[in-house]
Amino acid sequence: MGPLSSGKFSKKDESRLRSKFGTVYTLTLATLTCALGLSCENSRPADPLDQRQVKVIDLNRDTVIAVANENRAETARISFVETLSDTALVKVSNDTLFSQHGMGFLLPITKPMLTSIGGLTGDSLYVKYQPLKTPITGALTVEITYSR
């Protein structure tokens, strides 16, 4: 039974490996040991992410949607799932005036990207949808993932 399968490293093995690989070994050892479920005394689960999906119902009307930020997360990742037939503008901000810490997106997006907004305050994030040409068909879902 080797050191990995038993979950314990002998002092001799540990000393020999540490002298060869130094700090990198120590970090790798801790990661490997915890990943194998052998010893995770000082570890804790990752903070849960709060993900929201907002679907724009009427693509031919200007729409403002409030998305709850119940945990008062400081950062939000924004992505889109869309099949729009024509051009639309989506703004995301933490205030209804869309004046600070906001971003604007011109849809449809040919190369999907994941964008983050930092410095959020308050308990809501606002999504403003504006079709630039009508009639417009398809579907649009805005995905917001809050994190600390």
Image (tube, rainbow, N blue to C red):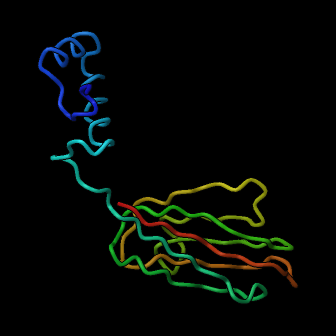
Residue 52: x and y, percent?
Answer: 51, 75
Task: Looking at the picture, tell me which residue is in the foreground, 37 or 102.
Answer: 37
* In this view, 48 is above or below 140: above
Task: Looking at the picture, tell me which residue is in the foreground, 33 or 68.
Answer: 33
Residue at 30% x, 23% y is: 24
Task: Looking at the picture, tell me which residue is in the foreground, 73 or 8.
Answer: 8
Residue at 28% x, 30% y is: 4
* In this view, 117 is above or below 92: above
Q: Is residue 65 left or right of residue 16?
A: right
Residue 132: x and y, percent?
Answer: 80, 76
Task: Looking at the picture, tell me which residue is in the foreground, 112 or 37.
Answer: 37
Residue 83: x and y, percent?
Answer: 79, 71
The N terminus sits in image quarter: top left
Residue at 14% x, 14% y is: 12
Q: Is residue 24 left or right of residue 53?
A: left
Quarter-of-image position of residue 13 = top left
The C terminus sits in image quarter: bottom left
Q: Is residue 68 left or right of residue 103?
A: left
Q: Name the residue furthest left.
A: 11
Residue at 23% x, 54% y is: 44
